[in-house]
Image (cartoon, grey):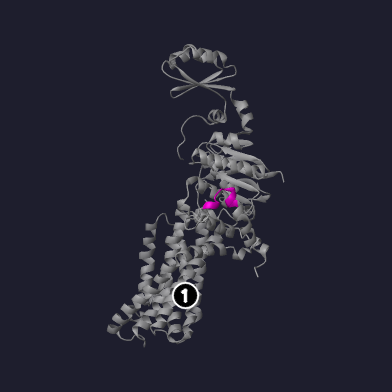
Amino acid sequence: MEPQENVTSGRSAALRWLPVWQRNLRVWAKLAIPAILGNFGEPLLYLLALGYGLGSLVGDIQGMAYIVFLASGTVCSSAMITASFEGMYSAYTRMEVQKTWEAMLATPLDVRDVVIGEVVWAGTKSLFSGAAILVVAGLLGAVASWQAVLALPVVLLTGLCFASMALVITAFATNYDFFLYYNTLIVTPILLFSGVFFPLERMPHAIQWASQFSPLTHAVALVRPLMTGSVPEQPLLHLLVLGSLGLGALALATVLIRKRLTA
Amino acid sequence: MNTVIKAEGLSKHYGDYPAVDDIDMEVRAGECWGLLGPNGAGKTTFLRMVVGSTPPSSGQLQVLGHPVPGEATSMRRRVGIVPQKDNLDPDFTVVENLLTYAGYFGLSRAERDQRIPELLAFASLEGRKNAYINTLSGGMQRRLSLIRALINAPDLLILDEPTTGLDPQARQLIWQRLRALRARGMTLVLTTHYMEEAERLCDRVTIMDQGRILDTGRPESLIRRYIEPHVVEVFGPDLESWHGEVGAALAERSEHVGETVFYYSTNERPLLEALNRQPNLSFLHRPANLEDVFVKLTGRELREGQ
């Protein structure tokens, strides 16, 4: 049965972001085949090449084959990359180039609804890509058990966190090149120094210390044990870091984007 | 409700620059109200305040009984907005654009399924409903923007320069549709640079410049208030000397603009007879129009972007 027809006309304020998310999903669905091919193909190639190729040189890490180590790291890093790209380049396109947000804001939607819709959408895309890697890793025998599906909520949270951070940057952007600052100064160091490709304990102390400020370090600390059949240490701490950073960035992004759009 | 928009002492300042400067105005239910003014007059800023896109610096604003910006989201449920530049979704077809927009209003499936075919017919876009936006002509895109703004069956439709950049045929078609909406009792608010458009569509117009309202009234009353009924535009060689010796004395008022002299007159006969004796001078005799009022009130100097 269809939901009550006129209930939707007064959709509760808490779900007003949903049509923003639906709009982006509808666009994604039009190009779903190449998108899904990319989601599965890229990690398959990287895991095969680096996991086996590099893995044969480095041997086991932290008691696991390198491909297992790498697979659990890239589930997290792909969530970051996907959400950051969506929150910067794609969101900027909708804000400035296509004026999609302007069209949305001519309806009962508010800036907050648009920002939340964009963040949840970017989180959803992260989930797609993280899930695809998880499947590929499973097929390659790099996942210990079904417990690994518990990594998916962490992937979503990681995506939401990085999407919110990216939208803070987008609030200041005047062109696409502006995002190179964030990519070079934030995303790349996080990618390299959060334990995705190499274990942190081999790094200099300063880097180990700094890596604790990287949200990705906390995502990896949760996802790697979940995918390899052990129990994460201090799970609440890691969740709290990702959650509070994400919420803080979301609030800041909303204020900054409102200021930008309603001047 | 008789008043749809009511602004009192409304201002918007950007730093020291008053984009809208202490204006009072009212739009009545069921009328078509036009806001005219040169570039930078404050028209778009005024409309942005009305729809809650930017908060006023001071003053009171009520739209459809809602205080704005306080209740802007509830107010926008009953308003349709056609932006100055089309912001249709290029990733979607015509019908997908409408469906997606209906989603932003939280319309039910039944409402969508009923309204979308009606709106496509209203805009004569049934045949193009599965076409992507970039394959539509400018006129079709404009019509789609118009029906997209009607998806929520609004009580008030706001159009910022609805026909700028359209060819004459496309413009006529938009005018026709706007008149049809007006006939159904919808309140229309539009800004325009085309005085002909304002004269043909609007019940009342307000002329704005430098953030302030210069005057408001029915187009024909404004014309009567400010301009003599006959206007004769004269151009050609020898104009200068003829004007000094003969022309200037034959009209109540005249104005030299570039290579043309505009004569404004209540009794045009003597002027036309004199001109008929001057084979070197060309002239155009026409009734006074809103453009004459506009130019008289806002001046002839060119306005570039602020």
Residue A220 seen by the camera: no
Image position, residue B71 (x, y; %): 64, 54
Instruction: List the single residue furthest toward the left.
Output: A57
Callout 1 crowding tier (Cα within 10 Å): few <14, some 14–19, many ≥20: many
Quadrant showing the N terminus of chain A: bottom right
Image position, residue A21 (x, y; %): 53, 64
Q: In the shown orientation, is residue B66 left or right of residue B149?
A: right
B118 and A259: which one is in front?
B118
Give the amino acid type for the residue marked by disc 1 in the picture: Val
Residue underneath mark 1? A155
Q: Is residue B260 magenta?
A: no
- In the picture shown, does residue A116 fall above or below A221? above
Q: In the shown orientation, is residue B114 left or right of residue B130?
A: right
Residue A102 seen by the camera: yes
- In the picture shown, does residue A183 fall above or below B125? below
Q: Residue at x 66, y 50 (%)?
A: B67
- In the picture shown, does residue A38 fall above or below A106? below
Callout 1 secondary element: helix
Q: Is residue B121 magenta?
A: yes
Q: Residue at x 58, y 42 (%)?
A: B190
Instruction: List the single residue furthest toward the front.
Output: B127
Which residue range is magenta in the image? B119-127
A209 and B68: which one is in front?
B68
Image position, residue B154 (x, y; %): 64, 50
Task: Name the chain under label 1.
Answer: A
A86 and B177: which one is in front?
B177
Image position, residue A254 (x, y; %): 52, 61
> What kind of secondary structure does the magenta stretch mostly adopt?
helix
Q: Residue at x 55, y 16 (%)?
A: B251
